[in-house]
Amino acid sequence: MKKRLISAALIGTLIFGLTSSVAEFAHAKTPKPTKAQIDAAKAAEAAKQAAAKAASSKLSAAQGTLRQLTAVAAAAQAKYVKAQADLVVATNQANAAAAHAALTAAAVAAQNRQIGRMAQNAYIMGSGFTDLESVLRAKGPQDLIDRLNTLNQVGASNSTALQRYQSAMVVAKAAQVEADRTKAAQVVATAQVAATKKAADDAKAIQQKEVNRLLAIENQLMAELAKARSIRLTLEQQLQLSTLEEANSAIATTTKYQAKIWPDKGFKGRSTTRSTEAMRAAAVAFAKVQVLARKPYIWGAQGPSAFDCSGLVYAAYNSAGLGYPNWSRLNAALYFVDTKRVPLSELIPGDLLFYSFDGSVQNIHHITIYAGGGMMWEANSKGKGLLYSNIYSIQGLMPSGGRV
């Protein structure tokens, strides 16, 4: 029980270390990364991180400027809206003053007509229209009284008409002057505010373009940083996986009394499969081509010119169309955990076979692809290379296969 818990803990640790792995395993320059390659990847990642930090600083400053310009543009917009409202008021006032001027002008015209009529009447009544002439021309007491009343009325009307005329002229002129002045001043003010608003909006638009440019640069650098980090992690993990598998294989060659087939201890795997029948057939065909081509065995290699055991399995299914994130380069033990358990009696071509030097999952050291008829395609070892062999030709077969 204690040994099983230790096994589960080790497997969990291995799986946790693989959460950031990506398909770039297939792009490693050499089968087994060197310390120099990993150091170079770390340096590249640090350079990208520094560039991303500098870009982020520039973007932050540009965004600060944009916020200031946005505030200026908002203030200019508010002033422009107020100026437009004031212009409407001034226009209404000018229109009202113009209407008032029209009324006063009409009143002046009316008084002009009245004065004209009085002058005409005075001419018709005689050569003059004075109090003395009215008395001299009277034909009797009643006529004199009538003439004097008429003179009084005409005089009063004349005086009133002249006063109204003069007042109307003054008011009309003042109203029109004030209306024209107010409207002209407000038109100028609105134009000035509109110019200020346009300048603020233009500055904001230019700064927004700069922010967008810097944001694009930052996004690009962050993507490059993520890729550099992924490459670095990939190289480190690939080194760890190949080293672990290599160590297990070395132990297996010196371990005595390994079972031909280990007893079933109830190890579980995935509950589902990811491959189709066509994929499995394609993976088997790929493995066959590599074996028949007599390509060499190299630790950590996954093609196209060399393979190790896990590398052949990865490359076979990758070529069949199973890609990341559903299919990553793992080591033999983790492929056991990441496939569906299949009894040996139910194997079909394309299923995976696993070999352990003590029957535990963490000590699985070899993985092959079942070819059918009790045979398998495998990347065996440095000495033997890639082989087509019997599934029992290697000791320590696990009691179940794995269906991808």
Image: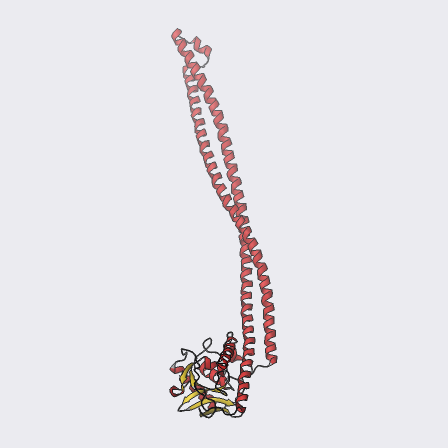
In which image quadrant can residue 371 be found?
Answer: bottom left
Q: Is residue 187 above or below residue 303?
A: above
Kindly give the residue lying farthest to the front in the view shown: 1
Most foreground residue, 121 or 331: 331
Q: In the rendered view of the protein, which quadrant contains the C terminus?
A: bottom left
Most foreground residue, 174 or 212: 212
Kindly give the residue lying farthest to the top in the view shown: 141
Can the viewer see residue 9? yes
In which image quadrant can residue 49 be found?
Answer: bottom right
Most foreground residue, 211 or 388: 388
Q: How many marks?
A: 0
Q: Position of residue 128 (x, y in %)?
A: 45, 14
Can the viewer see residue 329? no
Residue occupying image coordinates x 50% and y 41%? 86
Model colouring = secondary structure
Q: Position of residue 192 (x, y in %)?
A: 54, 46
Residue occupying image coordinates x 46% and y 38%? 92
Q: Position of residue 69 (x, y in %)?
A: 56, 53
In which image quadrant can residue 246 be found?
Answer: bottom right
Most foreground residue, 171 or 243: 243
Q: Position of residue 127 (x, y in %)?
A: 44, 14
Residue occupying image coordinates x 56% and y 70%? 225
Q: Is residue 172 above or below residue 70?
A: above
Q: Is residue 260 above or below residue 97?
A: below
